[in-house]
Image (tube, rainbow, N blue to C red):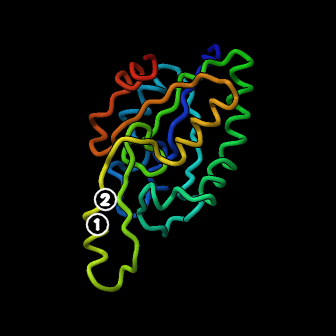
Amino acid sequence: MARGNRYVLLSHCLLNVNAKVLGYGSYSGAMKSLVLPIIEEGIGIFQLPCAEATFGGLKRWGMTVEQYDTPAYRRHCRWLLEPVMDQVQDDIANGVSVLGVVGIDGSPSCGVHQTCYGYCGGTIGSGDWVDRSTKSVRLDRGQGVFMRILSDMIAERGLSVPMASIFEGKPSRVSWEEIKKELQR
């Protein structure tokens, strides 16, 4: 069988839900409704690194974009993405078609169109901080920190790689056909 010379970059947890914050994840391993049609179409999959897991480990708390948007985390994202971008740039220069990036809306790192806002600050052990922090969390327009860094690095290298997103709350409703349309716009 001949090489397809094309691939899509996927957020890490779409292929490995175990990287998510404990308590999150509505599928057992990989998001089959997205991944299997890609494979069946003969498209390669490039798994992006998980910046949250490599920065905070599996025992981390769920956080918002305001909490991740720090110089240290942005530097970590850039460090993780340098070799990815080197490979993407070289692949494109050598005739490979990079169809796009698929992120996860709602994620403070991998959100493409929407991210998670709402940090209040304070300690979680006193007063009403937990209740106030929980109630302040909301989805709104914007990119997560990791996707914003990736977008910047794509532009810095003069490349054109489109981005699309899924909302993983209902994985059975995720459609590769819909994602593909978004990437082709």
Camera-side residue of 46 and 111: 111
Camera-side residue of 161 and 120: 120
Quarter in which the N terminus is drawn: top right
Residue that label 2 marks: 137
Please, what is the three-letter code of the amino acid marked with disc 2?
Answer: Val
Q: CB under 8 Å between callouts 1 and 2?
A: yes
Q: Is 116 located above or below residue 2 in the figure? A: below
Please, what is the three-letter code of the amino acid marked with disc 1?
Answer: Thr
Quarter in which the C terminus is drawn: top left
Q: Which residue is drawn at 30% across and 75% down?
A: 130
The quadrant holding residue 34 is top left
The quadrant holding residue 82 is top right
Residue that label 1 marks: 134
Q: Residue at x 66, y 18 (%)?
A: 96
Camera-side residue of 11 and 78: 78
Q: Which residue is drawn at 28% across and 84% down?
A: 127
Decide if residue 84 is on the left or right side of residue 59: right
Q: What secondary structure is found at the residue carrying circle 1?
A: helix
Percent of width and height locating residue 141:
36, 41
Percent of width and height locating residue 119:
38, 63
